[in-house]
Amino acid sequence: MAQRILVLGGDGYLGWPTAMAFSRQGHRVAVVDNFAKRRWELEIGVRPLVPLPTLHERAQAWHEVTGLEIELFVGDLTDYAFVESVFASFRPDAVIHYGEQPSAPYSMIDVRTATYTQANNVVGNLNVLFAIRDLAPETHLVKLGTMGEYGTPNIDIEEGYLTVNHNGREHTFLYPKTPGSLYHLTKVHDSHNIHFACRVWGLRATDLNQGVVYGIETDETALDPRLTTSFHYDEVFGTALNRFCVQAVVGHPLTVYGKGGQTRGYLNIRDTIQCLGLAVAHPADAGELRVYNQFTEQFSVLELAERVRDAAAAGGREVVIERIPNPRKEDESHYYNAKHTKLLDLGLEPHYLSDELIGSMIDTIDQHAGDINRDVILQGVKWVPDKLRDAREVGAAAGR
Ligand code: USQ
């Protein structure tokens, strides 16, 4: 059944392809964006691999290519008056919330980027919860969380909740979270706020704890070059596999941080689109917070680099792996077993990572090889400032 779907963060890597996919499926779609991502790019001196048209030009191109409309609302989710006006005029059945600062390194640059990330993400999400409560209480919130909320605990990761037996009694809690960056923490705060809104106000929500997304193309971006998505390879906004494919194209050593045993869940951007479709088609009940772990396979970062090195070699490109000092503070060898069956049970048909897919990503990226800026592959953001790390090391050596 056609729904009115509001995509928050609809100018982004995932938001724009998601908006197009729902529009093509016959839903009425509106997107909200304040172009903050385009500002952060200017601030840190990076740009997406393929230059992007403006959001208005993208929507116009979508109309020319498909005859369909995507409506636009330009504004900031931390401005409640704006959020209220969007809800009052569009009256969404479902809200897909991507509208947050998504980069762990960006949140770790300094106090300004850290407090900005936390305020932007947490306040924006709270505004959305209040707008749903007061203007559209039956609306289904589909919120992009992250697998990184869980961190890497030494036990199995369940899908959202953990039942604890304690002194002979039992209770089910939101799964305990130990995230690895101030950005990932914002998603934890959001999850708790959404849980509260469901428990106390009876809202309905689905939290999608998504793994690392890779890929450059969806069915809709492939329709026209103007519909391309925002693909990053720099240290701050690029993510593991996407970065490695770009590095392979320019012959840069593949940048494995530390030992490379960091294991994460991964999924193809096409599967992100599928998962959002499944989440919207199966709304949570009033008062329910559903949680899905949204990824299809898990890899260590070293395995991923080896896959890219081998696929690149098969295409005649020699590239080496370099284990560089880890700019992050994270476990580099750890237990990892995260459940992820609920979306499969709803019908998700994964596009698993294949050598062919890596090869085709490399070929697509190669078409833009001349635009790749090697200088932004490493930008020097560190989780622990050198000064503090040195002081800690001196202290440890002195037995303090
Ligand atoms: N890594 C490398 N080399 C690189 C880049 C990353 O070894 O050149 C390692 C990182 O240290 C980390 C792992 O690869 O252990 C993943 O890092 P990433 O940069 O690919 O992804 P991350 O910072 O975790 O964040 C990304 C998205 C974020 C989303 C998250 C899902 O930017 O929005 O929430 O993936 S997850 O990782 O499951 O939390």
Image (cartoon, rainbow, N blue to C red):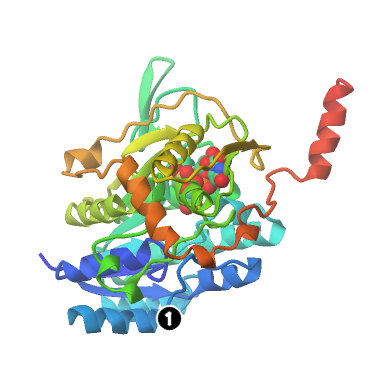
Residue found farthest to the left: 1
Residue 69 in sight here: no
Give the camera-side residue of 113 and 171: 113
Residue found farthest to the front: 316
Residue 275 in sight here: yes
Q: Position of residue 91 (x, y in %)?
A: 26, 75
Residue at 82% from the left image edge and 30% from the top image edge: 393
Q: Quadrant of the C terminus?
A: top right
Q: Position of residue 73 (x, y in %)?
A: 38, 80
Tell how many labels.
Answer: 1
* On screen, residue 199 above or below 260: below
Residue at 36% from the left image edge and 65% from the top image edge: 15
* On screen, residue 350 above or below 299: below
Q: Position of residue 52 (x, y in %)?
A: 44, 74
Type of the residue with mark 1: Thr
Residue that numbered label 1 is attached to: 54
Name the secondary structure under disc 1. Answer: loop
Horizontal side of 51 relative to 380 (left or right) equals: left
Give the camera-side residue of 113 and 220: 220
